[in-house]
Structures are given as structure tokens and as C-alpha cells.
Amino acid sequence: MLLDLSRIKAAREHFEQVYPADVFAADQEDFRVTATVSLAFEIFKDKSHYRLVGRTQTAIELPCSRCLEPITVAVDAPFDLRYQPHT
């Protein structure tokens, strides 16, 4: 999943997408995505600087740290990311 920020022209844009779980690599050893992944965020642009504020929601399956049986964990993670050119 790639987001080409160079295509963003407005000072503020909304991005929202839902991805099926099988889109994500099944070769992960630590966990497996088990539910659709919902991704929504606002993109704020200031010249060549970008700020992404939003959240992602899904469920993952991973082994229990005590018994190693698989458990499912809901993920609801907010984020606030800044991208700026390397100087």
C-alpha cells in the first residue's frame, strides 16, 4: 500500500479506504490480519511538508504469550504523522 503525496495539490484532503484482510502479506510470522482494514485520515499540505491525521481499525490474530494459542485482538489506532523533505 503506497500513498503518493506528490499528487496532493490542495492544502487539505480527506482519504478513506477499506482493504480486505487478504491484501496484507500472509508471510508475517508474528501476526495475521483477520478483518477488513479501515483507514481514514486527513492530509494537510504546507509546501513540501505533509501531516496525516487519522486512524486505522482492524483485527489481528497472534499467539498468546503464555499458552501460544491464537488470540484475536481488535486494533483501533489513531495516528498523527509528519512527512518532510530530507535536507
Image (tube, rainbow, N blue to C red):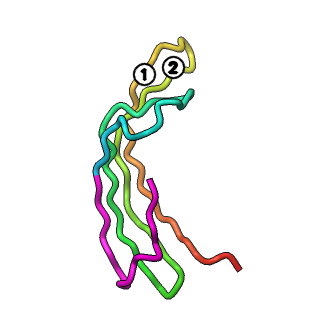
Q: Residue at x 34, y 46 (%)?
A: 57
- Residues drawn in magenta: 1-17
Mark 1 secondary-structure assignment: strand
Q: Which residue is mark 1?
A: 71
At horizontal 36% and vertical 31% (from top left) the residue drawn is 34
User: In which image quadrant can residue 59 be found?
Assistant: top left
Residue 10 in the image, given as x and y percentages of width and height: 35, 84
In this picture, residue 32 sits left or right of residue 85: left
Is 71 in front, or is 2?
A: 2
> Is residue 24 a member of the stretch shown in magenta?
no
Looking at the image, is 7 positioned above or below residue 58? below
For label 2, the residue is: 64
Q: Earlier in the sequence, mark 2 or mark 1?
A: 2
Residue found at the very far right of the displayed protein:
87
Identify which amino acid the numbered label 2 is placed on. Answer: Cys
x and y, in percent, of residue 67 in the image: 53, 11
